[in-house]
Image (cartoon, rainbow, N blue to C red):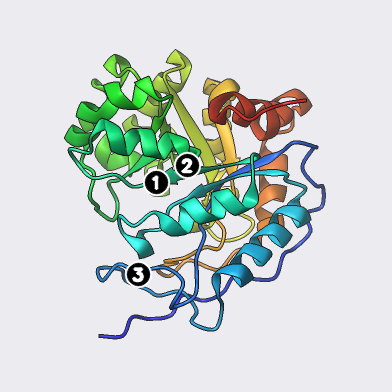
């Protein structure tokens, strides 16, 4: 059965203030044309068939340039299931200032993890929201091998649903955990909900990282409904916060298509301290993703 076509993102938009030199967009996805890379049969959407891999790569570079970002992290799209080739090729083509996050199944062996490290993959993604091939138990069992190769666990979850299940296990892991999209909470529950409280406690411990990303999935522009939670996460530990655009905004599921410049403007509005801005956009990604500096 044919899948719906994911809408293309808006053309790159300039923020009111561009990011500082060395800034990193830590969350974007790469797509390809219908004949470029094998698509997963279980996907809910398909990329625009009129755009090929080179076209997406060019648009991504323009997106970064408009924001002022010179580093990036490509998070493997569920459109391609466990075939990481679109992400691996993107990281290869983009160069040393880019890293990937890929998918590995439960039970993946050391050979597979080593291959990830050789591909400049920085971590494996666990998707609690949409399901996938890696479970929390599988990630915990894989963690010692991930640690041997300097990889981490990146997790898409709903803080208000999943935090209680995972909270006690995280401090004992030999690898850090990075949470996507401010923990994707239910905004109606407020910033003091136990899921956000748990995330803040983990941030304070230094054991986890969080991406201030994809606010458009929670609220409409100008995303002011997310300000209180973002501010609370940054206050908990600005040394463990990252920023990401979630470009090209696939699987909107009713959310409004955002403009990347607006999302960076939102970050600058909520995070007003210049030192914290620089840390989140530049210093933290350098540390976490082990980018080279000159």
- Mark toward the viewer: 1 or 2: 2
Whether residue 164 appears in this view of the structure is no
Residue named by callout 1? 102
Whether residue 277 appears in this view of the structure is yes
- Mark toward the viewer: 3 or 2: 2
Give the class, few, some or many, for how many residues have Cα within 10 Å of label 2's Cα (few <14, many ≥20): some
Specify whether 242 is left or right of 112.
right
Image location (x, y in percent) of residue 64? 70, 53
Q: Are the residues flagged by discs 3 and 2 in contact, CB closer than 8 Å?
A: no
- Residue at image location 49% in from the left, 75% down from the top: 33
- Residue at image location 52% in from the left, 21% down from the top: 236
- Residue at image location 79% in from the left, 37% down from the top: 20
Residue named by callout 2? 119
Q: Are the residues flagged by discs 1 and 2 in contact, CB closer than 8 Å?
A: yes
- How far, Cα to Cα, is label 3 from label 2? 20 Å
Counting residues from the start of the chain, the first of labels 3 and 1 encountered is: 3
Residue named by callout 3? 39
Counting residues from the start of the chain, the first of labels 1 and 2 encountered is: 1
Task: Report the quarter where the C terminus lies.
Answer: top right
- How far, Cα to Cα, is label 1 from label 2? 10 Å
81, above or below 127, in the image: below
Secondary structure of the residue carrying tag 2 is: loop
Viewer-nearest residue: 115 or 123: 115
Image location (x, y in percent) of residue 268? 72, 41
Secondary structure of the residue carrying tag 1 is: strand
Secondary structure of the residue carrying tag 3 is: loop
Image location (x, y in percent) of residue 29? 50, 56
């Amino acid at each position: 059965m044919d899948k719906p076509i994911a809408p293309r993102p808006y053309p790159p938009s300039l923020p009111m203030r561009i990011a500082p030199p060395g800034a990193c967009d830590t969350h974007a996805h790469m797509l390809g044309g219908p004949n470029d890379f094998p698509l997963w049969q279980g996907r809910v959407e398909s990329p625009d068939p009129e755009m090929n891999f080179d076209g997406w790569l060019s648009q991504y570079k323009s997106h970064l340039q408009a924001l002022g970002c010179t580093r990036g992290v490509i998070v493997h799209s569920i459109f391609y299931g466990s075939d990481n080739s679109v992400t691996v090729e993107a990281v290869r083509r983009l160069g040393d200032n880019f890293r990937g996050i890929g998918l590995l199944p439960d039970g993946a062996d050391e050979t597979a993890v080593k291959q990830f490290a050789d591909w400049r993959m920085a971590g494996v993604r666990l998707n609690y929201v949409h399901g996938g091939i890696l479970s929390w138990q599988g990630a915990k069992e894989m963690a010692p091998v991930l640690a041997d190769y300097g990889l981490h666990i990146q997790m898409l979850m709903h803080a208000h649903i999943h935090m209680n299940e995972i909270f006690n296990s995280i401090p004992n892991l030999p690898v850090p955990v990075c949470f996507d999209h401010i923990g994707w909470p239910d905004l109606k529950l407020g910033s003091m909900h136990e899921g956000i409280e748990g995330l803040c406690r983990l941030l304070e411990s230094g054991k986890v990282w969080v991406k201030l990303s994809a606010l458009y999935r929670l609220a409409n522009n100008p995303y002011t409904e997310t300000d209180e939670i973002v501010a609370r996460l940054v206050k908990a530990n600005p040394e463990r916060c990252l920023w990401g655009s979630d470009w090209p905004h696939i699987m909107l599921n009713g959310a409004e298509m955002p403009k990347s410049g607006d999302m960076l403007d939102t970050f600058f509005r909520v995070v007003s301290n210049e030192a914290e801005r620089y840390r989140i956009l530049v210093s933290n990604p350098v540390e976490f993703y082990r980018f080279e500096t000159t």
